[in-house]
Amino acid sequence: MCPQPFVDNSTFTEDCMSMILYVPTTLHADSSVPTLMWVHGGSFMVGSATNPGLDGSALALATDSIVAVIQYRLGALGFVAPNNQTNLGLRDAVNALTFLTTVLPSFGGDPSKITVAGQSSGANLIRALLAVPSAQSLFQSAILQSDPMDYGFLSSSDQVQLQQYFVSNLGCTATDSACLNALTADNIVNGAGLWQFNSSVYVVPAATQSEPMRVVNDGTFITSTLDSTTPFPRVSKPILLSNVLDEGGYTIYGSFPTPMPEAEYVAIVNASFGETRYEALIGSQSYAVGTTQNDDYRPQLQVLATDSVWRCATWTFARNWVSNGGTAYVGLYSVGASYPGNSAVSFCTESGVVCHQDDIEIIFGTALNPNSAQSALIAEMQARYKSFLYCGNPNPDDSSYADWQAAGTSDVNAIMLGSTGDAPIGACTPSFWGQSVAYDYQVFDI
């Protein structure tokens, strides 16, 4: 894996620019099948191509395609350089795409049929790829699972502050090459890099606590924010966007293990969103006080976190994408497979709960001992992904599955994945999030 904190130093190396290719044995050089290039998540700080559940064998066989799971530089080494370079981890993904266009024909892959996909910060990186003009010819479509779109890309001015702060904690000046070259990867990722991750939000609030080192809208490599703060560019690629039912569950219930009274809920919403947004949120039916039984407002706070960071922000992105020429399909997982580590939060093990990351082993078909509902959804999603990889539409021919309608400029037609019908709209209307209540990227003007 690439250098990162929280692991033994012997498990990572700076020589980490690699990928794993999963190639069905039935392919031959002139097969010309599509490829799914997967980008792992981990807040741009941790993770690798061998993360749990990312064995692409079953997915490659089910979709009759090649699956490539890539690695990219993480944390300070990928996103905060002393010499003011930016987006190094994103450039790694572009290099991976360029590499694939060269080698895929040798494995039976068509280099003109690459779909990029990822989950969480991996999906965030996929969205950044959609904003890189020089990369557009390298892939045909994109899949974004659980992208925390509320955060937005960092602005160049914020990045400058964060880089200056990073250098101040390195113990070297930005121009002292001898000092910088003497630093080990461990010095960087477990020293200044980990400090940067934990404290950046206090230097630049827009950095957030979850993805303080991330993609930067530099105006050259990336030329659009791809959000509602600047004019949205004309687009044409088909994209597939999904969220899980309880995206915020792990964070909220992990941070607040005991019931939350109304006064605490009110204080947290006010502190998190500021007075102006607080008034609008508390005044809405979706997040109002006085509507929760047993004086526990964690369920309400969980919905608020899910809507603000993930679901409603994703739906706004879908409307923007469609309004500017693209095609988008939107879905919400009501069934998942509990991802390793999520069991640390008991809420995520409850029946009917689908926490962040619980979609990964559904897509890859790597869930251990799946029940009937999980098995059915694995088969459905792999069939839908196969169709999307081949023709940009997640509706297989001669299928018994429900018709997955493309999003419109107002109604995104979000389908339930694992149950029937459309996802409830709730507060994810065009007039509420992004209008009455601003997203963080609008508040911080990034």
Image: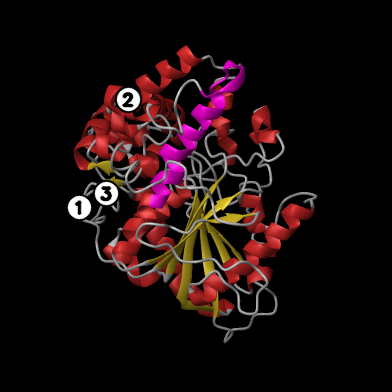
| Residue beneath the point at 47% across and 42% down | 426
Residue type pointed to by label 3: Ser
Per the image, is 6 magenta? Answer: no
Q: Residue at x 50, y 74 (%)?
A: 103
Is residue 301 shown in magenta? yes
Most foreground residue, 241 or 168: 241
Query: Residues in magenta?
Result: 291-315
At label 2, the amino acid type is Glu
Q: Which residue is mark 1?
A: 219
Circle number at residue 279: 2
Expressed as whole percent of the image width and height from the top left, the position of residue 228 reads 27, 49
Indicate the secondary structure of the residue bearing disc 2: helix
Label 1 crowding class (10 Å Cα cut-off): few <14, some 14-19, many 20+? few
Q: Foreground residue, 324 or 35?
A: 324
Is 10 or 132 nearer to us in this picture?
A: 132
Q: Is residue 31 above or below residue 245?
A: below
Q: Secondary structure at mark 1?
A: loop
Residue 22 placed where, x, y %? 63, 66
**Comes first in the chain, label 1 or label 2:** 1
